Image (cartoon, rainbow, N blue to C red):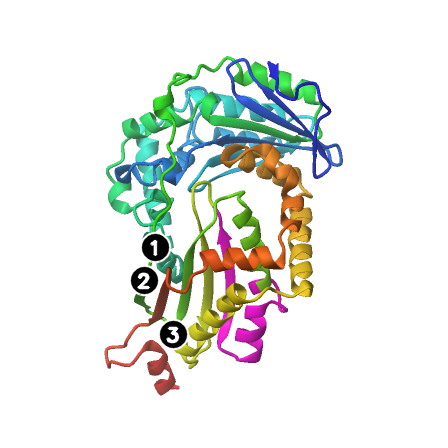
């Protein structure tokens, strides 16, 4: 193994000393040593998600995540979950537009088994045709359930406009017409290209001896051959940001009594200065009962039953989202205008020092809460390592504190433009009589 710390003292993240090594095959490993609890989290991250898929293979990364639990040439279906349960641990996985990650959490006297399981499925996934067809039905059902959710359905329409031709426009789960024709052979090509040491990062966090952990990582992963090592053709070239130079309005209906609104703008990239500024803006707008949107739209004016905001920064491009559900009988035009006014305030005037300090404290408290568990530490380090650089996780607090009222105002003025956004409404569907669902319900009361 080769060291990349250069002999310097290990830096700390949330009380954990972070040791970095490259295995003999080049695979990077991070060990976050923290002995506060007798627990170890093991996470294996792959630089593959929805944005790495071709249009006709949309959803393959998420589907492959499912199949990673369905057996290898050494272990049968369900063996990973069974072993995890017998050892008293837990495991799961998730896929995003930018990456896929797998995690185990075990007591510190038995965690090495996670490395064996993870190394096995990195190289020996079976993709049994019968299991493949069975799990495809599960994924298709998951897709159907998402389409039956009014917020997800509306958000999907917004994403298609917000991200345009960029792969971010496609849902991570894919589409029925891309999932149904998918085969074990086509998935295996995807697996071979992306599930390899050169596209992975291993994170071991918790109550471990770093030298022993690194030796164990070398033992189980170091001999895995990367068939694409040195092949630059598999590198994913960044795509230009989608262009949105007008207001695009979306009108749709849903068979219930609610009116739902989403506003969205192109946002910043993960880890950029814009990302930190928009995090503060989101907190000022919608975190807690003292936030601007909740206080005005829910408490003072009674226009919305719920309101929230989200800074969805991603590795290539991001989005800034507002969500509001109107109170029954409220004037939707008034609700939309109120949201417009609150975004205009962010563009036109600096926030107060009191609001700025409160937002930063809330973000710091949330970060501190998330870092209480070893799995959260492994997740943060792994996400940064995969999408940006793990050392960038060490200065999040410093960069967030560097956001000023003036710098946040400038970012909002640059990105949250009134004439370059998506405005999407989902309104109650009309009943056969021609009345909306809301009106029909009122008539029958």
23 shown above or below 380: above
Q: Disc 1 or disc 2, which is closer to the eye?
A: 1
- Crowd around label 2: few <14 · some 14–19 · many ≥20 (10 Å): some
Residues at marks 1 and 2, CA–CA distance in whole angstroms:
9 Å
Q: Is residue 308 magenta?
A: yes
Report which quarter residue 49 is drawn in.
top left
Query: Contact, CB < 8 Å: mark 3 with mark 2?
Result: no
Q: Quadrant of the N terminus?
A: top right
Task: Give percent across and percent down for residue 86.
Answer: 59, 31
**Of circles 3 and 2, which is in front?**
2
Query: Considering the numbered disc 2 on the image, is that residue within a helix, a strand or a loop?
Result: strand
> Where residue 355 sits in the image (x, y, percent)?
65, 64
Is the C terminus in the top left, top right, bottom left or bottom right quadrant? bottom left
Which secondary structure, mark 3?
loop
Let me know if residue 171 appears in the view.
no
| Image location of residue 180, percent across then percent down | 26, 41
Mark 2 — residue?
Answer: 248
Please name whichever residue, 78 or 46, is drawn nearer the observer in this view of the structure. 46
Q: Is residue 219 above or below residue 270?
A: above
Q: CA distance from mark 3 to mark 1?
A: 31 Å
| Residue at image point 51% right, 25% down | 118
Q: Residue furthest right?
A: 36
* Callout 1 crowding tier (Cα within 10 Å): few <14, some 14–19, many ≥20: some
Q: Which residues are magenta?
A: 285-313
Q: Position of residue 141 (x, y in %)?
A: 34, 48
- Give the total number of marks visible in the rendering: 3
Picture residue at 38% right of the left edge, 34% below the top: 64
Asked if the residue under mark 2 is in contact with the one under mark 1, i.e. CB atoms within 8 Å, the reply is yes
Q: Which residue is mark 1?
A: 244
Disc 3 target residue: 257
């Amino acid at each position: 193994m080769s060291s990349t710390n250069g002999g310097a003292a290990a830096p700390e993240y949330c009380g954990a000393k972070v040791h970095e090594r490259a295995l003999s095959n080049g695979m990077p490993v991070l060990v976050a040593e923290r002995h506060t609890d007798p627990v170890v989290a093991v996470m294996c991250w792959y630089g593959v998600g929805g944005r790495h898929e071709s249009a006709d293979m949309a959803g393959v990364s998420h589907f492959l995540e499912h199949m990673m639990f369905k057996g290898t040439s050494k272990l049968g279906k369900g063996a990973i979950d069974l072993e995890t349960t017998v050892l008293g641990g837990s495991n799961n996985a998730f896929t995003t537009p930018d990456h896929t990650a797998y995690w185990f959490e075990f007591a510190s006297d038995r965690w090495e088994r996670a490395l064996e399981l993870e190394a096995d499925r990195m190289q020996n996934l079976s993709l049994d045709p019968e299991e493949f067809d069975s799990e495809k039905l599960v994924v298709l059902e998951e897709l159907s359930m998402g389409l039956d959710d009014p917020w997800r359905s509306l958000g999907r329409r917004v994403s298609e406009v917000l991200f345009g031709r960029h792969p971010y426009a496609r849902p991570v789960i894919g589409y029925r017409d891309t999932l149904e024709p998918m085969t074990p052979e086509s998935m295996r090509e995807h697996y071979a290209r992306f599930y390899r040491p050169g596209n992975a990062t291993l994170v071991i966090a918790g109550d471990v001896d770093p030298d022993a952990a690194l030796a164990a990582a070398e033992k189980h992963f170091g001999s895995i051959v990367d068939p694409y090592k040195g092949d630059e053709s598999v590198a994913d070239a960044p795509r230009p940001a989608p262009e949105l130079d007008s207001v695009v309005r979306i009108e749709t209906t849903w068979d219930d009594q609610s009116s739902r609104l989403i506003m969205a703008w192109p946002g910043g990239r993960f880890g950029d200065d814009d990302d930190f500024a928009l995090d503060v803006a989101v907190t000022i707008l919608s975190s807690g009962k003292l936030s601007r949107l909740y206080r005005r739209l829910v408490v003072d004016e009674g226009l919305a039953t719920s309101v929230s905001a989200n800074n969805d920064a991603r590795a290539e491009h991001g989005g800034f989202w507002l969500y509001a559900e109107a109170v029954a009988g409220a004037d939707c035009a008034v609700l939309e205008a109120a949201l417009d006014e609150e975004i205009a305030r962010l563009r036109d005037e600096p926030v107060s020092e009191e609001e700025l300090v409160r937002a930063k404290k809330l973000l710091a408290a949330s970060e501190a809460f998330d870092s209480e568990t070893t799995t959260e530490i492994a997740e943060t380090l792994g996400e940064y390592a995969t999408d940006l650089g793990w050392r960038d996780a060490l200065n999040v607090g410093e960069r967030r504190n560097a956001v000023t009222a003036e710098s946040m105002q400038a970012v909002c003025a640059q990105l949250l433009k009134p004439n370059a956004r998506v405005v999407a409404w989902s309104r109650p569907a009309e009943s056969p009589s021609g009345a909306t669902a809301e009106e029909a319900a009122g008539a029958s009361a």
